[in-house]
Image (spheres, rainbow, N blue to C red):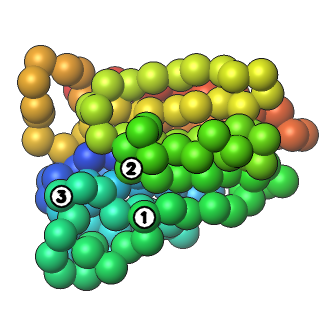
């Protein structure tokens, strides 16, 4: 299973992001979506799960959950927008924890649990690169990859 992971679109879905997510089996969006139309476009590619970010305060995106928990290809995951909102027990309950907010890509293994921030793909903020991630799950193995969008 190939899972596309993105965050912080802030109302802008770049054509390059749509090219990159093509062929994904599932898409996870870690918040600051900006507009519900972005999720609709992504749903044209694969099933989508998304959380509400700190700027998702109006419209349909304001109704997104703060936390999503689930399982993909037998791998339990948890997702929230801000790293500081991660519950410590999640690393015992999940193999994959996804967050965004900082616009900084991060990969950190804590034992058998991967903490992943895909970075940001929306309007450029600060001097950080535009990035997203892919997680490939095969036979219970979790393989992450951070990808530059431009």
Marks 1/2 in contact by CB < 8 Å: the verdict is yes
Viewer can see residue 131: no
How far is the residue under mark 3 from the one under mark 2?
10 Å
Residue 100 occupies quadrant: top left
Residue 127 vertical placement versus 122 (above, below): above
Numbered badge on residue 66 = 1
Q: Residue at x 24, y 56 (%)?
A: 54
Which residue corresponds to mark 3?
55
Residue 113 in the figure: left or right of residue 56: right
- N-terminal-most mark, 1 or 2: 1
Viewer can see residue 117: yes
Circle 2: element type: loop
Numbered badge on residue 81 = 2
Residue 123 vertical placement versus 46 (above, below): above
Query: Looking at the picture, how far across and down is residue 77, in whole percent?
Result: 67, 51
Q: Quadrant of the C terminus?
A: top left
Query: Looking at the picture, how far across and down is residue 117, in whole percent?
Result: 44, 33
Q: Residue at x 26, y 46 (%)?
A: 8
Which residue is situated farthest in the front direction here?
A: 88
- N-terminal-most mark, 3 or 1: 3
Circle 1: element type: loop
């Amino acid at each position: 299973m190939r899972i596309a992971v993105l965050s912080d679109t802030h109302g802008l879905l770049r054509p390059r992001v749509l090219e990159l997510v093509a062929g994904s089996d599932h898409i996870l969006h870690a918040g600051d979506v900006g507009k519900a139309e972005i999720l609709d476009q992504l749903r044209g590619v694969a099933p989508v799960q998304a959380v509400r970010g700190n700027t998702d305060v109006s419209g349909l995106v304001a109704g997104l959950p703060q936390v999503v928990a689930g399982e993909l290809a037998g791998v339990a995951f948890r997702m929230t927008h801000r790293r500081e909102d991660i519950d410590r027990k999640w690393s015992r309950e999940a193999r994959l924890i996804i967050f965004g907010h900082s616009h900084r890509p991060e990969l950190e293994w804590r034992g058998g649990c991967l903490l992943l921030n895909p970075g940001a793909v929306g309007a450029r903020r600060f001097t950080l690169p535009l990035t997203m991630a892919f997680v490939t799950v095969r036979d219970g193995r979790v393989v992450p990859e951070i990808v530059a969008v431009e």
